[in-house]
Amino acid sequence: MTDGNGFLNALRDIVGETHVLTTPADTEPYYVDWVGRTRGTALCVCLPASTQEVSAVVALCARDAVPVFPQGGNTSSCGGSVPLEEGRGILLSLRRMNRILSVEPENDAIVAEAGAILVEVKAAAEAADRLFPLSLSSEGSCAIGGNVSTNAGGTAALRYGTMRDLVLGLEVVLADGRIWDGLRILRKDNTGYDMKAMFVGSEGTLGIVTRVALKLFPLPRHRATAFVAVDTVAGAATLLGRCKAEFGPLLDAFELFSGSQLDIVCRHVEGNRRPIDSDHPWYVLMELQTRDGAKELSSRLEALIGEALEDGSAADAALAQSHAQAEALWRLRHSVSEANRRHGLNFTHDVAVPIGRIADFMQEADAAMASDFPEAEIFSVSHMGDGNVHYTAIFRPGAVKASGADARDLGARVTRKVHDIAVGLGGTFGAEHGIGQRYRASLQRYKSEVELDLFRAMKRALDPQGILNPGKVL
């Protein structure tokens, strides 16, 4: 690498003096993840304002073999959006590249820069009577480029799929600074390899996403939302099957809570309250959405829940009678991460198993935690409609040493146990959060050598110097 001051001055020439941050007060928010568990450092934080500036910055870094750590909204839960501890490299923040470039209702497409915040993308689509369906608890701060790079899922994946299913085209800056322009809004393009698929979910290790073209859908005008108590996870799975059979594509979300998870959401996050007064071991938040037929939709949902209450597959229920009540129910779901963070040292896992094995996973994981980590409190929430389970073990203050190597070792042991169970049931250790730094060991443990060789070959081909987000994924 060349002289440090000379390199920083060259960066300033590209992006401007005020957009290269070096003082601790300015850089600190970029160097630690939102949960405060993963921390790193870098030579500087660089904030380009255009694809051309990103290209010039990356070309400079490639020339001097300087690592580049791309970052969007810094909402990663796997340490994928912060630099490593060694202090080499630059953090490349895309926050200034936050424009909605076009909304095309006739093509059901929206084009945005990678730093655009998810909630703003959704609002721009809605203003054109369209829906961009990705729904995350972090949508007020996560960036659309990060959503692409981690293949984000969320609560509407049951109906619309993950980010991989929502991307039409991408613009990407490659490791040598060249720009690949794949920013198309076509539904069909069978002219060779699907290049965009390589970058969705690659977490900035193969290229830096700078612009995205996304699918839009007709904007639903009506919804029916309910919160249902069930006695078992198997009972929730039965209820899910009934909803799929009755409502088909109108079923937008089907979220499972453990009773313990609901308790701490109401205890730690102001404004939440229990929709059902009686205590139950499990709860389901479900929602239907449609363009028309609001009264019929609500009546059908009420009838199905009534049947479930009569035959004992549901224990109690609360149906939202207004938009405000529906929003209050969703606030419970979107408060989960904040509640877990406030409750103690938490290790949240992002596993997925076949829907019919979720009950088995919960039973095996609970037994393993009780045996090996009796001081842990267990909380679960699941995008049950697609088999994704966020299984969380929380250690209260005083139960363990809550920082440094001791916490990392504890997290590794808990994670290995949870991942072994999920993979053993035909599932995966990573469903929607990505790999980052946290799950690198799991990737090596569970992926075949053939698959790992293919990963490494792609990395060598696209980033031969290994400067793009090193230490992540591989």
Image: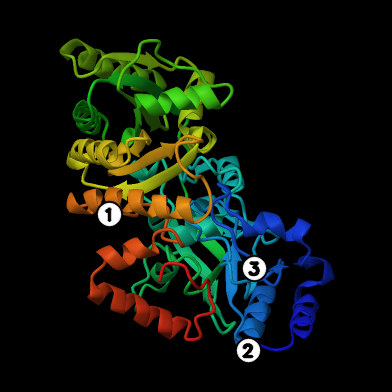
Neighbourhood count class around disc 2 (C-alpha, 10 Å): few under 14, some 14–19, many 20 upward:
few
Q: Which amino acid, mark 3?
A: Leu
Task: Point out residue 146 in the picture as x, y percentages from the top left corner.
Answer: 53, 58
Callout 3 secondary element: strand
Task: Point out residue 5 in the picture as x, y percentages from the top left corner.
Answer: 79, 81
Numbered circles on residues, count = 3
The residues tagged by marks 1 and 3 sit, at their Cα atoms, a distance apart of 31 Å
Q: Is 258 placed above or below 208 here?
A: above
Give the residue pinned by disc 2. 63
Return the residue nearer the eye: 323 or 264.
264
The residues tagged by marks 3 and 2 sit, at their Cα atoms, a distance apart of 16 Å
* Residue at x 33%, y 64% (from the top left corner): 443
Return the residue nearer the eye: 34 or 140.
34
Q: Which amino acid, mark 2?
A: Arg
Callout 1 secondary element: loop
Q: Which mark is residue 92?
A: 3
Q: Which mark is residue 428?
A: 1
Task: Point out residue 70 in the picture as x, y percentages from the top left corner.
Answer: 58, 67
Callout 2 secondary element: helix
Q: Along the polypeptide, which appears first: circle 1 or circle 3?
A: 3
